Image (cartoon, rainbow, N blue to C red):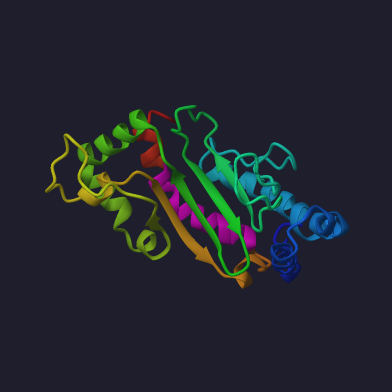
Amino acid sequence: MPGSGFFTPELFRFLKELKTHNNREWFEKNKERYEKHVREPFVRLIAELDPGFKKINPYIVADPRPVGGSMMRIYRDIRFAKDKSPYKTAVAAHFWHAKGQKDGANPAYYLHLEPGKSSIGGGIWRPESGPLKKIRDAIVKDSKGWRQITTGKDFRSSCGMVGESLKRPPAGYDPSHPFIEDIKRKDFIISTPLDDRDVCRKDFTEVVLNYCRTAAPFMRFLSSAVGLP
């Protein structure tokens, strides 16, 4: 039922306990809790988000499949990790651009749920050199449009820029450009925190979609910059 809510405090209780007991034996004993309070409501949320995403941007994919869809695996890749804990202690979903390229030029929204550290955001994380240059060039070419997007009141209040930047301006760009700090970015990501109460709200679908509507001009700028519809 739309607007009926998805998550309860049991989501965060499970994740806190998983952090303390990060082993297969404990997880298998508590797998029913994981299914009931984590995976099933997350999959339902993703399915309910899809029509809203289509109105914001018809190319954004919200795939409710429990395996291979928008919800990311809870199992960690420990092949080359020193930490051999088998499970992530947070759950997340990403909603990607259907026409995204393999070179990292794929704008996406993301949703991260973790006790006391939940967040929602979007953008392109660590694009390769080709699309990265296209984004930087787009900021130079359309500085007015970039300014309108990134200095708007709603955007500034809920879409903080995060990620890594170069220490010096990249070669070929004017160090005195008014947006040189953005041109120096290696990640074009925005994010805002969510408290646990936000995640458990009955209208959490609208909480997510309202953020994505606010972020939509930023996402459109990135999509256009890298040649996506």
User: Which image quarter: residue 114?
Assistant: bottom right
Vertical position of residue 206 compared to residue 76: above or below: below
Front-most of residues 135 and 175: 175
Query: Residue at coordinates 74% horizontally, 51% vertically from top-left?
Result: 44
Q: Main secondary structure of the magenta part?
A: helix
Does the magenta portion include 213?
Answer: yes
Residue 110, position in %: x, y? 55, 49
Q: Can the viewer see residue 176 in this picture?
A: yes
Q: Which residues are magenta?
A: 204-219
Q: Is residue 26 left or right of residue 5?
A: right
Along the viewing direction, whichever of 15 and 54 lies nearer the viewer: 15
Vertical placement of residue 60 versus 121, above or below: above
Left or right of 225? Residue 118 is right
| Quadrant position of the C terminus in the picture | top left
Q: Residue 168: within the magenta?
A: no
Q: At 31% from the left edge and 46% from the top edge, which residue is drawn?
A: 185
Q: Is residue 162 above or below residue 63?
A: below
Left or right position of 58 against 91: left
